[in-house]
Image (tube, grey):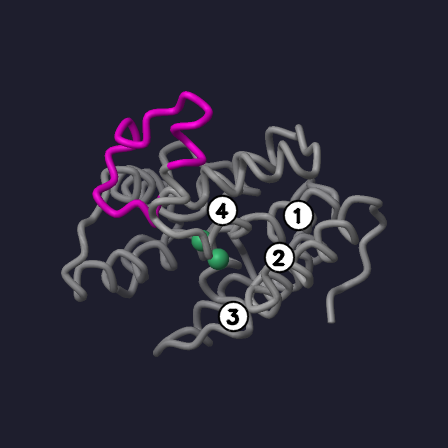
């Protein structure tokens, strides 16, 4: 069950998820609930509506096929190759952003940025970008070794949690021998440079 948010748009997005992509509901509502809890406890400066919309919309295109993702971009004059990904699935954040704009009329750049950047991370991420990135990876339906410790850190300080979570994601990408994209490397390098206790970073 999703946390209550004062918004006209949030119920519309939820209705869409339940009708069109019901298998994504648990993950999207889980991401939203985790992010809302942190936003409320850490006073991050974003409204609940911004947080819920970014969280609920981040994977709107997650179930699109590779061909559909490419088509959605090409039909709008966007070159999919310009992103430099050899795996089209990594384009789903950009297509989710398009759906958020065109279907729900979302124009808040903070919300759109968080949707766009959630997959690989990117240089220059703001706190909402980091909140959605982290919540996506460690919300309640996710499970991997060490996740409870990451959740604990995130519940204390989302900015401190971000480099640890992206480090974990990068290590899993490398372990599975998937390509590692420059966006993730830049986001990681920037994030660790701001850590208060770099020696405490456990990879
Ligand atoms: Fe995603
Ligand atoms: Fe996700």
Label 2–label 1 contact, CB within 8 A: yes
Secondary structure beneath disc 4? helix
Quadrant housing residue 85 = top left
Quadrant where the N terminus is found in the figure: bottom right
Using the image, tell me which numbered label, if any, was put on residue 35. 2
First in sequence, mark 3 or 2: give its number. 2
Secondary structure beneath disc 2? helix
Spot occupied by residue 134 in the image (x, y as percentages of width and height)? 48, 56
Q: Is residue 37 above or below residue 195?
A: below
Density class for disc 4 (Cα within 10 Å; few <14, some 14-19, many ≥20) is many
Using the image, tell me which numbered label, if any, was put on residue 66. none
First in sequence, mark 4 or 2: give its number. 2
In the picture of the structure, the residue carrying the numbered disc 3 is 152
Spot occupied by residue 51 in the image (x, y as percentages of width and height)? 66, 48
Whether the residue under disc 3 has CB within 8 Å of ligand 2 = no
In the picture of the structure, the residue carrying the numbered disc 4 is 130
Instruction: Tell me if 61 is positioned left or right of 57 in this view.
Output: left
Secondary structure beneath disc 1? helix
Instruction: Find the distance from the CA under tag 4 to the CA under tag 2.
Output: 10 Å
Instruction: Find the distance from the CA under tag 4 to the CA under tag 3.
Output: 16 Å
In the picture of the structure, the residue carrying the numbered disc 1 is 51
Density class for disc 1 (Cα within 10 Å; few <14, some 14-19, many ≥20) is many
First in sequence, mark 4 or 3: give its number. 4
């Amino acid at each position: 069950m999703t946390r209550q948010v004062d918004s006209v748009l949030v119920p519309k997005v939820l209705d869409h998820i339940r009708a069109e992509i019901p298998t994504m509901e648990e993950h999207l509502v889980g991401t939203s609930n985790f992010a809302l809890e942190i936003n409320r406890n850490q006073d991050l400066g974003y409204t609940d509506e911004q947080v819920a919309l970014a969280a609920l919309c981040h994977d709107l295109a997650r179930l699109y096929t590779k061909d559909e993702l490419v088509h959605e971009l090409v039909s709008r004059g966007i070159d999919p190759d310009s992103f430099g990904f050899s795996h089209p699935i990594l384009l789903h954040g950009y297509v989710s952003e398009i759906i958020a704009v065109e279907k729900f009329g979302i124009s808040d750049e903070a919300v759109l940025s968080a949707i766009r950047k959630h997959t690989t991370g990117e240089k220059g991420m703001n706190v909402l970008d980091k909140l959605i990135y982290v919540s996506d990876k460690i919300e309640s339906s996710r499970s991997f070794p060490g996740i409870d410790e990451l959740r604990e850190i995130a519940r204390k300080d989302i900015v401190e949690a971000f480099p640890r979570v992206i480090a974990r994601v990068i290590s899993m990408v490398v372990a599975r021998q998937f390509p590692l994209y420059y966006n993730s490397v830049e986001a990681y390098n920037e994030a660790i440079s701001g850590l208060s206790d770099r020696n405490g970073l456990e990879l």
